[in-house]
Image (cartoon, rainbow, N blue to C red):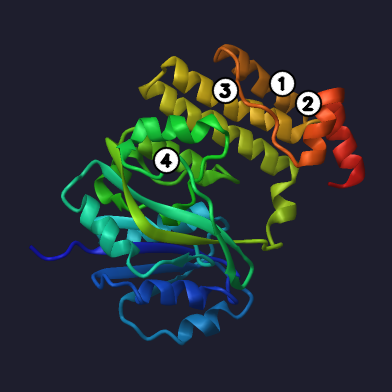
Amino acid sequence: MPNPLVSVCVPCHNAGPYVSQALKSVFEQTYHDFEIILVNDTSTDITAEVLATFKDPRLTVINQKCGSASKARNLAFEHSKGSLIKFFDADDILSPGMIEKQVARIEDRERSVATCEWGRFQKKNLSSYTPNRQSVWRDMSSKEWLIESFRDARPMMQPGIFLIPRGLIEEVGPWDERVSPIEDFEFFSRLLSVADDIKFCDGQTLYYRSGLESNLSAKRSREAIEGTLHSLLSGTACLLDKKSTKPAQMACANLFQDFIYTQYPDHEDLREIAAQRVKELGGASIEPNGPSRFQQLRKFLGWKIAKRIQRLLGS
């Protein structure tokens, strides 16, 4: 039986300094039956010049205005032919054996999704890579994976972690182009809510580039905060529609409680929506996250005063 074709779908906007490294990490895979569909979304930097240096026929570049990563991913998927799909951002890096190992785990399983290890590195400094170990780094039911990921309100759903059977994407539908940011949370919550299980690939890594300044201000805007809440509401509803147990409700409540902690004292109306959802779900168990100084202050002053002091100090 021939190896299944893997389609690597890449949204790209002004990723000129990084896209070459990202693409090379795909071309250097030990698995060779893949195509790359890259959507260059009106980049104004050196992206086009960098892409022109790649002559491998497995790379298809589509130059089209999309305006969002979700739209670019959907366009790439529409042009893809693979039976297995990896959505991969243009500034991240794959370990060389990832696709081969992920294909081996799910090529005969139409309702399984493969995952891998992951960690962060800063800007261009790959030597700064640190693995972010999580309890979900193992084979497990996809719904239990969601519950466990939600429980500490730090789910990692970066697209490059996953390898997905095409049929699952066709079943749940495309990326929701109305959702931004954390559109990956909504998409993968929706997808994993209908999948059967997760197959984990030990020793294979997504290197996630952090510390880029380009989108930080946009993520702090009112529109972005509204989008974050919308994504949380949509993604958690997908899980609870399939598995509304007490552990699932508590895990979802923790996400909304973390939203309240994170946004305080701003956006009172949005925090009230989140608080109502926490109440409906039976309450949350998560404590506020923060540096040691904040944790010390909140023991004596409460988390709200500690948050205000933290903001005044700029920490």
Disc 4 target residue = 136
Q: In this rendering, does residue 21 appear at all?
A: yes
The image quarter containing residue 212 is bottom right
Kindly identify which residue carries mark 1: 272
Q: Residues within 10 Å of mark 4 (few under 14, many from 20)?
A: many
Res 266 seen here: no
Does 4 appear above or below 43?
above
Amino acid type, callout 2: Glu
Extreme right residue here? 312
Q: Are marks 3 and 1 in contact (CB under 8 Å)?
A: no
- Is residue 67 placed above or below 231 in the rendered structure? below
Tell me the crowding category of disc 1: few under 14, some 14 to 19, or many 20 or more residues within 10 angstroms, Cα based.
few
Up-down relation of residue 285 to residue 194 (above or below): above
The residue that appears at 81% across and 28% down in the rendered structure is 298
Give the CA separation, mark 1 to mark 2: 6 Å
Q: Nearer the viewer, mark 3 or mark 4?
A: 4
Q: Is residue 15 left or right of residue 187?
A: right
Residue at 23% across, 70% down: 33
User: For the residue marked with disc 3, what is the amino acid?
Assistant: Ala
Please report contact status of discs 2 and 4: CB closer than 8 Å, yes or no.
no
The disc label shown at residue 268, or none: 2
The residue tagged 3 is 253
Name the image quarter holding residue 135. Answer: top left
SS for tag 4? loop
Residue 56 place in picture, x, y as percent? 34, 83
Q: Quadrant of residue 35?
A: bottom left
